[in-house]
Amino acid sequence: MWYKNFPLELSEFLPNVVSFSCVDSYATLEMEHFPFYDLGHFYRRNLFSYDQWEELLDRLFRINCDMKKKSDVEKPQVDFNYIYLDKIKDRLKALSKQSPFWAHLLKEEMISINGKLYKGFLIF
């Protein structure tokens, strides 16, 4: 299985295996649960600054690059640039075409919501 071949130096990114069994070609794997919030939780609540998001995403991309370098790690057939960047850009572009309101809002450098300023979408 993939987790048995995972490089030791990258194992900090995996949950620990609680149990594993293989009976009659039927495998079960139980891994520890991480009781943490996903990144969407932090994004929706605006809990990180722009700089913190930039640092976090840079680190995620570095981890992804490290994993790609390992020949013994199963490589997913996934385009991470599409998932994290291009898809968001495509959705924002489609949203801006829906109405002049969105087109104008998405071009703003800063956006005020209930009196609080947020960074706009110009980074995309």
Image (cartoon, rainbow, N blue to C red):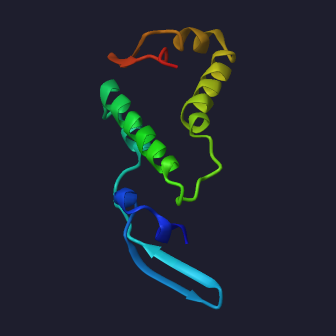
Check the image and report above or below for 87 versus 121: below
Q: Is residue 64 left or right of residue 55?
A: right
Number of marks drawn: 0
Residue 60 image position (x, y, % from top left): 42, 41
Residue depicted at 47% across the width and 71% down the height: 4
Residue depicted at 48% across the width and 9% down the height: 108
Residue 30 image position (x, y, % from top left): 46, 76
Which quadrant holds residue 120? top left
Residue 31 image position (x, y, % from top left): 43, 71
Residue nearest the viewer, comparing 50 with 118: 50
Which quadrant holds residue 112? top left
Q: Is residue 37 left or right of residue 64?
A: left
Residue depicted at 54% across the width and 14% down the height: 106
Check the image and report above or below for 21 versus 29: below
Residue depicted at 55% across the width and 30% down the height: 85
Give the quadrant of the N terminus. bottom right
Q: Is residue 48 left or right of residue 121?
A: left
Q: Residue furthest bottom?
A: 24
Which quadrant holds residue 71? bottom right
Check the image and report above or below for 25 versus 73: below
Check the image and report above or below for 35 versus 123: below
Q: Is residue 38 left or right of residue 99?
A: left
Residue nearest the viewer, comparing 1 with 55: 1
Residue 47 image position (x, y, % from top left): 31, 35
